[in-house]
Amino acid sequence: MADSDIVAARLTVHLDAAVLWHHRPAYVELVHRARREGLLGASVFHGLTGFGAGHPKSAHLTAKGPCAVVIVDDEERLRSFLSGVADLLGETYAVAVLDRVRIHRP
């Protein structure tokens, strides 16, 4: 590991972009909560096709289909964040993956 690398964690939440949480997309709510918690960063990536819970999903370049919300921060902070979004994750059938990463700063 280089001196400029920082050990961190990456939380990736896989969900259907069409799922709403209180009248707005669930992925928007995840990013909003991540910003409110002061996490380092969050991005949303929309997929063209995928499957989950046994159902194929196709996006056809719309706001439907699979998406992934990727959030990077300290592992403890992300675990705490996961606890805070358990309500959203449980009702949207999202799958969350937490893994350790290295942030490289030149």
Image (cartoon, rainbow, N blue to C red):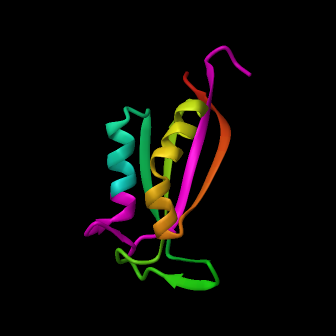
Quadrant of image for the N terminus: top right
The residue most toward the left is 23
In the picture as drawn, the residue positioned furthest to the top comes out as: 3
- Does 93 appear above or below 39? below
Which residue is at 38% across, 63% downward? 26
Span colored in magenta: 1-28
Which residue occupies the foreground of this view, 76 or 57?
76
**Horizontal relation, residue 32 to residue 4: left or right:** left
- Quarter of the picture holding the C terminus: top right
Res. 37 image quadrant:
top left
Magenta run includes residue 70: no
Work out whether 50 lies above or below 27: below
Q: Is residue 5 left or right of residue 64?
A: right
| Residue 6 within the magenta-colored segment of the rendering | yes
In the image, 66 versus 61, the foreground residue is 66
Nearer to the camera, 62 or 68: 68
Q: Residue at x 39, y 42 (%)?
A: 34
Give the mark count: 0
* In the displayed structure image, the side of residue 52 where residue 35 appears, left or right: left
Residue 25 horizontal/vertical position (percent): 33, 66
Q: Which residue is at a point 44% across and 80% down the rendered structure image?
A: 59
> Residue 62 appears in which quarter of the rendering?
bottom left
Closer to the camera in the image, 28 or 60: 28
| Residue 48 % position (x, y) | 50, 75
| Residue 26 drawn above or below residue 83 | below
Give the x, y percent position of residue 22. Answer: 28, 66
The correct choice, above or below, for 8 with respect to 96 in the image is above
